[in-house]
Amino acid sequence: MSKKIAKKAAPATPKLPPREGYFGEFGGRYVSELLIPALDELTAAWKKFSADSKFQKELQRLLNEYAGRPTLLSFAANLSAKWGAQVYLKREDLLHTGSHKINNTLGQALLASRMKKKRIIAETGAGQHGVATATAAALMQIPAHIYMGSEDLRRQALNAFRMRLLGATVSGVGGEHGTLRDAVNEALRDWARNVDDTYYLIGSAIGPHPYPTIVRTLQSVIGREARAQILKAAGRLPEAVFACVGGGSNALGIFYAFLKDKGVKLIGAEAGGRNLNPGNHAASLTAGKPGILQGALTYVLQSADGQVHNVHSVSAGLDYPGVGPEHAYLLQQGRTQYVAVRDKAALEAFKELAEEEGILPALETAHALAAAKEYVQEQRKAGRKNPLLLICLSGRGDKDVQEVERLMALPPEPEQEAVEVAPVSTAPKVKVISAG
Ligand SMILES: *Cc1c(COP(=O)(O)O)cnc(C)c1O
């Protein structure tokens, strides 16, 4: 699949000189003028502290002593034998709070404390970023205010309670049907009102500059560790690296260290949902178009007149109608590839990892596993055997057990076409992986 996708994704636009805050034409700061001074202040603080050895030392201490870094690289022996591959898993699931999200929230909360901010605000959809933010804010002793859509709050009552136990204030917004979009708007309004003393902590490599750069830099520890670990364990670089893509932070985090290793394929797994009709998936790079979402130019799931689509995924953490702008750029450059993985395939991968390796992955993570399995099958058809693969195990699945139980009890859905591509799109044609 690689060559074809890369060719189709080749840039149609002339090469522009790099502009600060842009990844090619993507990224930027498409926000209200009220927020520009705050983004400037954040950019300056990030430049200062990310080059400051005391800040780096303290961050490293927190990652080691509090979060549990470095995380393990596990050779998945049973899965490898079953698939006919050599599969290594980067174990972000073993971190405190259960996923890679803590790498980012610890770094940004430390930055907030160095900037002498008096409060931290964040928005959260399913609540995972809210919990990771409340955790880091408690550790830094900075009050946190988390915005959630009212409907999300109802569906994720336990996560909201977790945040409150951690000392955060949680507000439901957007009326009865409020979701992530309303939470984002409310957080932005709060920030515009309180820029002087408030730090806005964004949870993925999305949003206006400098957030995509800050979050990618904080998450790039995943790939730095994994690259050294796999060189030591396998004696060479992997043939391909897999990660799931919601906003894209764990994927960028593991991809970044391999960008210059031209022989290493970097493959992102998006949420292909039930099918690729609007409202049934969250595959922004597969089926979206360039547009502006949350302050950045990136791939967005939207109608012809720019209405943002509703999204669906079996995994709450991939349920986002956009994607980090750096992914849009890397796709355009042909450096990365993206596949859309169906709910059903993710669910099967979830069960397979549990049974073969004794690890319950997050449903988000299961998309990356399904993409890797499909890759091995394709390679085998082409006569290539036993590929060396690295998969980012972004989080653990304990949070998803109830949902998986519910899904397993449902009657089977009618069979769908195995492969579908976006009906109308300027995006390259990318393969969709179905179960079975
Ligand atoms: C939130 C989450 C994701 C998706 O976020 P990215 O920014 O795309 O990494 C993936 N996996 C897990 C376990 C998550 O909690």
Image (tube, rainbow, N blue to C red):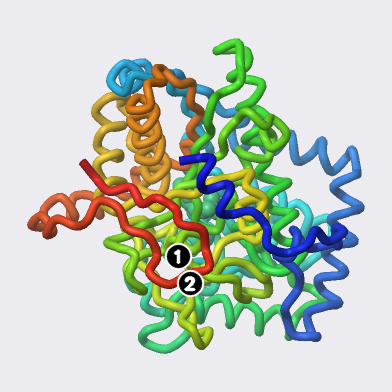
Q: CA distance from mark 2 to mark 1?
A: 7 Å
Decide: is 80 above or below 150: above
Which kind of residue does numbered mark 1 sit on?
Ala
Decide: is 347 above or below 36: above
Query: What secondary structure is marked by label 2?
Result: loop
Which of the 4 quarters of the picture holds residue 190?
bottom right
Quadrant of the image containing the N terminus: top left
Residue 360 drawn at (x, y percent): 33, 36
How packed mark 2 is, by other alpha carbons closer than 10 Å (few <14, some 14-19, many 20 or more), is: many
Decide: is 113 above or below 424: above
Decide: is 99 above or below 246: above
The one nearer the camera, 330 or 110, is 330
Quadrant of the image containing the C terminus: top left
Residue 121 drawn at (x, y percent): 64, 69
Q: Which residue is the site of mark 2?
A: 301
Tell me whether circle 2 and circle 1 mark residues in contact (CB < 8 Å): yes
The one nearer the camera, 365 or 1, is 1
Which of the 4 quarters of the picture holds residue 328?
bottom right
* Residue drawn at x 59%, y 54% as measured from the top left: 9
Q: Earlier in the sequence, mark 2 or mark 1?
A: 1
Q: Which residue is the site of mark 1?
A: 287
Residue 52 drawn at (x, y percent): 91, 43
Q: Is residue 43 left or right of residue 407?
A: right
* Residue drawn at x 38%, y 27% as measured from the top left: 382
* Residue drawn at x 36%, y 73% as measured from the top left: 278
Which of the 4 quarters of the picture holds residue 26?
bottom right
Query: What secondary structure is marked by label 1?
Result: helix
Residue 43 drawn at (x, y percent): 85, 62
Which kind of residue does numbered mark 2 sit on?
Leu
Q: Is residue 210 left or right of residue 358?
A: right
| Residue 139 in sight here | no
The one nearer the camera, 342 or 88, is 342
